[in-house]
């Protein structure tokens, strides 16, 4: 038997309805904040992520699905979308459009990680990027927007973690201090940290190895090294969040696993997720455009929600499975009835009802099936009904039966459904 590839999943009903629900909620919020959708390719050039996310990050050095195409080009399945959005921004000169470019995306990303609950090799993100402003007011609005998405889908009890990772002016001072302190302790750390302490000491702060944590906690804090501009920016973000009553915890170790970040970084965690507790992550990337070869600066900030984790949290907070509702199940008895029923069904579907038309079903089985499918009403159409032009509509919950002509059907179903709701 051929199975889904390790780390990938089929999203089946009824869960697929929850996926659609969170996506529509996110789209509504994006609309309210005037974000427009961007769809970028899943295939990108490998160099895009090496230059943006960073050669030394886990994502690029260990987790990318890379292959050489027949023409020799090095391609990857995108591991994230911020770099792609910035590539598209530069390629299509979106800087020439008026105002800040506010773009959102929903789609699959690929990272070859060790699969576990909440961690997949193909996973989905709902993300947004605001490109073209350095203002801390944009940071606060982006954070407010993502919290609004969580509120709309009914998630409670999440925690916002906030940090500033400085800029190319002040970060080197911090990295030098980090390197200096690491010299004395790195022999006691994991092999990855030993390598990172040489190549990219900031990445040591992302280490998840439990034994390394006390050592990392004692390392210098980036907040003590911020330059005047970064400090002012961070203070402004914090006070704009305070104005909105948005609670957060400052976490100086939150450097996040991607190299393009400058200044603000943030993450939202949720206890229901277990070990993979990061529901979403984001931050500012003021130098990303230049790193990708743009001569025009394009400071930006954005976030990506792990949609698999969002859906998991929603499903855990509402354990009763949302059932897809069928308004009407039609059971035709015989070929003439089936042909007639097809027209009745088409008409009601055009009016917006969800109708399941049975075929090849015996009368007794038909009612059983209507019940199992969770249909609200069932309609039997046989020779008598065809001849008389009136049908017997059965309310599946109460068992009550009522007769209706073809023209009365829609009215009978919707009137009673409104009463039920
Ligand atoms: P990230 O932190 O790499 O950031 O990913 C964001 C979110 O995607 C994570 O918080 C998590 O919920 C989800 N995620 C990541 N890896 C997996 C996985 N293997 N399985 C399931 N979910 C996963 C970014 O991707 C940046 N592009 C965020 C950003 C946007 N920064 C600025 N703009």
Image (cartoon, rainbow, N blue to C red):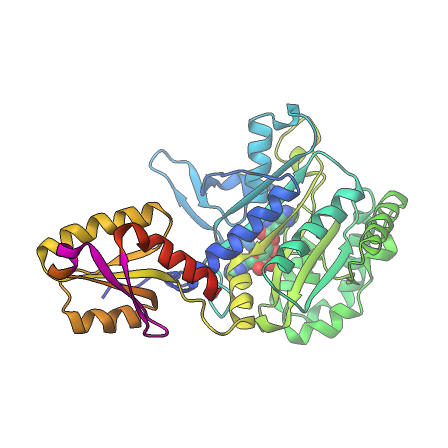
Q: Is residue 395 magenta?
A: yes
235 or 403: which is nearer to us? 403
Q: Residue furthest front?
A: 388
Is residue 253 shown above or below 241? below
Would residue 330 be found to the left or right of residue 417 on screen? left
Q: Quadrant of ligand 1?
A: bottom right
* Magenta region: 385-404
Q: Residue furthest right?
A: 228
Snapshot quadrant of residue 398: bottom left
Q: Is residue 414 magenta?
A: no
Q: Residue furthest left?
A: 335
Residue at 33% over, 37% down: 70
Work out which quarter of the rendered image holds the N terminus and state it: bottom left
Q: Residue 277, how many percent across, how many down? A: 61, 68
Q: Residue 14, how many percent across, how many down? A: 40, 64
Snapshot quadrant of residue 285: top right
Q: Residue 137, how many percent across, how many down? A: 79, 43
Would residue 41 be found to the left or right of residue 2 on screen? right
63 or 117: which is nearer to us? 117
């Amino acid at each position: 038997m051929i199975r889904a590839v390790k780390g990938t999943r089929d999203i089946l009903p009824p869960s697929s309805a929850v996926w659609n629900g969170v996506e529509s909620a996110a789209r509504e919020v994006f609309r309210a904040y005037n974000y427009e959708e961007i769809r970028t390719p899943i295939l990108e050039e490998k160099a895009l992520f090496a230059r943006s996310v960073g050669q030394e990050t886990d994502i690029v050095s260990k987790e990318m699905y890379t292959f050489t195409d027949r023409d020799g080009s090095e391609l990857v399945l995108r591991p994230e979308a911020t770099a792609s959005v910035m590539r598209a921004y530069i390629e299509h000169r979106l800087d020439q459009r008026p105002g800040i470019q506010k773009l959102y995306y929903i789609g699959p990303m690929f990272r070859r990680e060790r699969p576990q609950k909440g961690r997949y090799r193909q996973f989905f993100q709902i993300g947004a990027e605001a490109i073209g402003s350095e203002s801390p007011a944009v940071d606060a609005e982006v954070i407010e927007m993502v919290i609004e998405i969580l509120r709309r889908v009914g998630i409670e009890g999440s925690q916002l973690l906030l940090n500033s990772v400085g800029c190319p002016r002040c970060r080197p001072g911090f990295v030098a201090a980090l390197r200096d302190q690491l010299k004395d302790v790195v022999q006691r750390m994991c092999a990855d940290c030993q390598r990172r302490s040489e190549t990219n000491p900031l990445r040591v702060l992302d280490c998840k190895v439990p034994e390394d944590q006390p050592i990392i906690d004692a390392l210098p804090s980036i907040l003590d090294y911020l330059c005047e501009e970064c400090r002012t920016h961070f203070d402004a973000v914090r006070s704009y969040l305070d104005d909105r009553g948005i609670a957060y915890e400052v976490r100086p170790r939150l450097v996040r696993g991607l190299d393009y970040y400058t200044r603000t970084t943030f993450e939202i965690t949720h206890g229901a997720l277990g070990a993979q507790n990061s529901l979403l992550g984001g931050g500012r990337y003021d130098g990303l455009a230049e790193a990708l070869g743009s001569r025009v600066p394009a400071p930006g900030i954005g976030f990506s929600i792990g949609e698999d984790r969002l859906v998991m949290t929603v499903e855990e907070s509402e354990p009763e499975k949302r059932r897809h509702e069928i308004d009407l199940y039609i059971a035709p008895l015989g070929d003439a009835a089936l042909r007639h029923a097809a027209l009745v069904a088409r008409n009601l579907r055009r009016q917006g009802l969800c109708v399941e038309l049975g075929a090849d079903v015996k009368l007794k089985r038909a009612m059983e099936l209507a019940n199992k499918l969770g249909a609200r009403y069932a309609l039997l159409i046989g020779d008598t009904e065809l001849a008389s032009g009136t049908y017997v509509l059965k309310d599946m919950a109460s068992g009550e039966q009522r007769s209706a002509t073809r023209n009365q059907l829609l009215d009978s179903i919707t009137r009673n459904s409104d009463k039920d709701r």
